[in-house]
Amino acid sequence: MIQLQHSSQRQNHCNHGARTGRCRWPIPILITSGLLLLHLFVTASTFAVAEFLQEYNIVHYTDHTRLLLWKDSHGALQPVKTADDWKKRRAHIINNFEAAAGRRSEKSRDPEQITYQTHESVSLGNIVRKKITIPIDDNDIIHAYLFLPASKVKLPAMLCLHQTTKSGKGEPSGLAGLPTLHYALELAQRGYITIAPDYPRFGDSTTDAYQLGYVSATAKGIANHRHCVTLLTQLPEVDAERIGCIGHSLGGHNSIFVALYEPRIKVIASSCGFCSFPKYYGGNLKGWTHAGYMPRIASLFDSDPKKVPFDFTELLAALAPRPVFINAPLRDANFDVEGVRDCVKAALPVYQLFGKTENLVAVHPDCEHAFPDDIREKCYRFLYTHLRDRKESK
C-alpha cells in the first residue's frame, strides 16, 4: 500500500511537470508504467494472501450461519451428524479465527507454574482485595485485582474482564467507573474468588503486544486471560472444576475469545460483546481493525464480512455445549440486537446436537449499551446454577 501511494504521488508530480515543460517522460509511458506497477503489486499481493491462507489452512465457508456442515479435504460439504463431525467444523473455525488474530505463540502457552506478587492488600469485611502482578517474563507483566472471600471450603472462581475504559481492571473491581459494571466485587461478595486483569494498554498495563511478537492485541489478551485461569486453578482456595468468565463490551467478546481456547472455563457470560459481522455497523468492520483488536481484518480481509474467514455465529457455536449467558440490549448502538439473534439462531442447532439447548440463554433488556441490575441478577443466578457445588444440589 505504501508503494502504491509513492507511485501515485510520483505520477501526479510528473504529469504536473509535463504541463509546465519540466518532465521529459511522455504521459502514455507514465500511464503504462503505472498500470504495470499496479498489476505487479496486485498480483504479488494476491499471491502473498493466497500463500498466507494456505499457511493457516483456511477452509472458507461462504455462509457462516449454516454450522451443521463441514468441508472435507476435497472441499465438499458434508453434514455434521455427530459430536466428532462437529470437531472437524470447530477446528476450521479456530483456524479461520487465527488467520485474523494470529496463532498462539510459544509465549502464550501457560507456564507450568504461575506466581504472583502482592502490592496492596485491603480488607473489605470478609473479603480481601489484593492488587497483584503476574510476571510472565522481564518484558511481560499482567496487572490484576484478586478478591479472596473468607471460607473454609474451596470456592468457585470467576475471571472478570473489563470494558473499554481507561481504568481497566479498576471498574469491575469497584474502584472506578459504573456501579453496574462492578461484577468482580459483586461476585466476590456472593462467595466467588474473582480476578480482574488489565487488557493490554489499559489500567496499569504498558505491554505492547506487537513488540512481544503477537499479530493482534486480541491474541495477547487471550494469553493473559489464560494465565489468569491457570493462576486460579493453582490457588488452594479455588475449586478448579468450577471456574467461569464474565465480561462487558470489550470484556464481553474477550470472554468468548478466551473460552475458545480454555476448556477450564465451564460457563461464560457475555454482556454487550458481539453481533454478526454483516450487522455490525452495516458490515463496516473498521472498529475491529485498530491495534487494540485484529489489524489483519483490514490488511488481509479488507474489513469485509464476506472476506473475513470467521464470524461470531461460529465463535458462539464453538463454545457448545458449555453454558453461555448473553446480555444483548434492544438499543445497543455497538452491537445490533438482530445480529446477536443471528448468532444465537446459528449456534442453537449445535447446542441441540449435544442435547443442551438450555445452556444457551440470551436476554434483551430495553436499554442501550448497558448491564442493568436486574439482568446482572439473572446472570448471577445462571452462573450459580452451573457453578454451584454439586453436593448442594443433592
Image: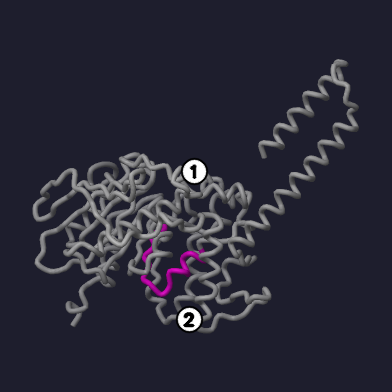
| Residue in view at x 85 percent, y 20 percent | 23
Q: Foreground: 30 or 140?
A: 140
Between the residue at mark 1 and the residue at mark 2, the CA separation in whole angstroms equals: 36 Å
- Residue under label 2, please give it: 83
Give the quadrant of residue 377.
bottom left
Whether residue 133 sits left or right of residue 278 in the image: it is left
- Position of residue 265 relative to residue 225, above or below, is below
Q: Which of the two labelled residues, at mark 1 and mark 2, occupies the earlier sequence position?
A: 2
Residue 56 picture location, percent across and down: 58, 61
- Residue under label 1, please give it: 291
Contact? badges 1 and 2 (CB < 8 Å): no
16 part of magenta stretch: no
Residue 206 picture location, percent across and down: 36, 39
- Position of residue 94 relative to residue 86, above or below, is above
User: What are the residue bounds of the magenta stretch?
Assistant: 313-328
Give the quadrant of residue 374.
bottom left
Q: Which label belongs to residue 124? A: none
Residue 228 visible here:
yes
Q: Secondary structure at mark 1?
A: loop
Query: What amino acid type is highlighted by mark number 2?
Result: Ala
Colouring of the image: one colour
| Residue in view at x 43 percent, y 59 percent | 257
Q: Quadrant of the C terminus?
A: bottom left
327 part of magenta stretch: yes
Residue 100 picture location, percent across and down: 54, 55
Query: What amino acid type is highlighted by mark number 1?
Result: Ala
Residue 247 picture location, percent across and down: 35, 55
| Residue in view at x 73 percent, y 28 percent | 9
Q: Secondary structure at mark 2?
A: helix
